[in-house]
Amino acid sequence: MNITSPRIENGSRRDFLRSAVQAAAGLTLAIYLPGTQAATAAAAAPEFEPNAFVRIGTDGTVTVIAKHVEMGQGAYTGLATLVAEELDAAWSQVRVEGAPADARRYNNLAFGPVQGTGGSTAMANSWEQMRKAGASARAMLVSAAAAQWKVPAGEIRVSEGIVSHGARKAGFGELAPAAALLPVPADVPLKSPENFKLIGKHVPRKDSADKVNGRAQFTQDVHLPGMLTAVVARPPRFGATVRSFDARKARAVKGVVNVVQIPTGVAVLAHDTWSAKKGRDALKIDWDESRAFKLGSEEIFAQYRALAQQPGLVAHNSGDAETVLSRPGRVLRAAYDFPYLAHAAMEPLNCVVRIGEGECELWYGAQFQSIDQPSVAALLGLPPEKVKINMLYAGGSFGRRASKDADYVLEAVQIARASKSRAPIKMVWLREDDMRAGYYRPAFHHALEASLGEDGRPTAWRHRLVGQSILTGTAFSGMVKDGIDAVSVEGASNLPYGIPAMRVELHSPSDIGLPVLWWRSVGSTHTAYSTETFIDELATSSGQDPLTYRLALLGKHPRHAGVLKLAAEKAGWGQPLPAGATGTRRGRGIAVHESFGSFVAEVAEVTVNADGSFSVDRVVCAVDCGMVVNPDVVRAQAEGGVGFALSAALHGAITLKDGAVEQSNFHDYAPIRINEMPKVEVHIVPSAEKPTGIGEPGVPPLAPALANALAAATGKRVRSLPIRTEELKA
């Protein structure tokens, strides 16, 4: 299939940005655009490609092939840093492009034979792999120079993209043709950390410039010749289907080309998004709701609370918590409700697809190629290798684009197939689709009990969780053991505190018809809240300092203790907060949590007014994510995690009435505004451990630290999210 390279849509916006940048800088950069004579000449030049991750052109450009999608988390910069460090390339000569769908070469080592981005694994699984890719390329360039100059390879130096021996010097591009003829070394030594020049240092992000000057390509920027845009009318309740529809008024809308039925609803195809939307609005659809889900939020939670009164499947059991809890003594209990949450990424779901003879090509911010590619292949009856995926930038995801069943990608392909046209199709979800058509962070109910000894420390702990399983019945069902979905209980079943008897149980109701999916930090989004607010309550009920109490229970977990101590020190824990205005109360709270192999502690400071309204004034965050690849990215992700978590804690809730989602856009599912964002300080624990994740671990501790601060200020415990100001009134 001969597919024309995509051109940029909205050219005037991007032309404006480019012109502005050039005028401001006083410098015009030559850019190879697809189809130009310069681009053709560059493509014809031989390139040095020693492995799947590095390509060096004769012009000296080092292209790093990124197997992880760049969705704002800094993956491109981190992966390029690992390669450039061992290659000794100049940072300015390095560029990044997304890898094709090919799990044999680009699998996520943390996931096995699966290509995908998620679980905060981008740096952790690439740490040695990408460094070895750079080191191998460096060794081959050195060998090529040694052969040409007839000198020992051990005497050759490489720095900033220049290979040298005495007065002799050559750039990577000059040596690339000769290096390409050499065998790839089986094993290469890697640098010791004390010799790092890029890792752990400040380097500019590789995606920032293109996002500022308009060159970055997102799915919305793709425009193929003859392309149509599709918008789908979906049922108002999950499980409903199309009984019949009348498309006469929709077809009469100017710009509308076709209307087709697909499994998820009715798609309107037009020359542009607005015409497609107007056509969708004009449809008359009779929905069959005989199998639709019709419960409301309160009915769901009523079921969950009833289940929590009964024993569940055992996810963790140490000691004999049941016996200890039944003895006379002081026992504290608490129950928590967590709502459904939307991902609400800045870029709603979208995908461009073109079906040809015996093959299919897609353009989108692909996050889970090993789910999407075979799913499309099965739908079309093609071999997986005949489904080509072009990985573009994604405007956020928070887990939504890592669809466990390729839902939105399949929807795009179904539209293209149903249209019976050779025209490429761009399927676009509007914000209302994103809010109302799923998928969501599951709603959960937690019930906790703890008995306290004479010293105020817990002697037994029982934790029951009720919520939908994300993994059951999916390609990831191997992570469900004995009925326990690992992501439902993460952060609860591995609680770090030294409690003699601990039991964790899970109920996973299968009759709730809402589609659910991982949401930034997954199970830890609710387990961190319940465990860290409850442990805080145990401490204060015993008249003990929450920090000291936690540290006493963390004897076998020094990394938890390390971030706790650092956050507390930087926040001035133990020192009184400055008094607020008359009639206000101030409080400070702390929380710690491990997720994705990283450890994060956060201290929140709040001011509460007499009417229950409050401000989050300051958040101090301490992070231990192993060896840091880029400290600026770590800080940015921690800061972003605070803002993301604060949005959910203050405003986030997807609610249902008679099975229909009540929210539709940012007016009723609001992110935090700039005036609600606290001052955030991020402190990184120096570490010699291998890198672990940072995209998600900053989220879980924020809400419990905030709730603990509110409790310190008001004496009132927040048992359900989002936080309601009426519960905090004086």
Image (cartoon, helix red, strand yellow):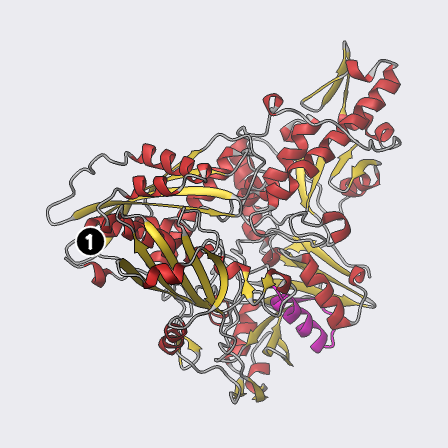
View extreme (top): residue: 166
The residues colored magenta run 404-426
Residue 390 x %, y % = 70, 54
Q: Is residue 676 visible?
A: no
Q: Which residue is mark 1?
A: 715
Question: Label 1 amino acid?
Answer: Gly
Depth check, front residue: 402 or 37: 402
Answer whether residue 409 is magenta in the image. Answer: yes
Please name the residue shown 62% across and 21% down the image. Answer: 195
**Does the magenta segment cover residue 270?**
no
- For label 1, count other residues whose C-alpha is less than 10 Å away and answer few (under 14), some (14-19) or many (20+): some
Q: Is residue 75 left or right of residue 465?
A: right
What residue is rendered at 84% in x and 14% in y?
Answer: 152
Q: Position of residue 183 (x, y in %)?
A: 87, 32
Q: Nearer the viewer, residue 304 or 281?
A: 304
Task: Please say if 602 is above or below 2.
Answer: above
Helix, strand or loop status at disc 1: loop
Horizontal arrangement in the rendering, residue 479 relative to residue 491 (left or right) = right
**Residue 676, percent from left and from top:** 31, 50
Residue 683 at what x, y percent from top left? 41, 34
Q: Quadrant of the C terminus?
A: bottom left
Q: Quadrant of residue 82?
A: top right
Up-down relation of residue 155 to residue 434 (above or below): above
Left or right of residue 112: residue 545: left
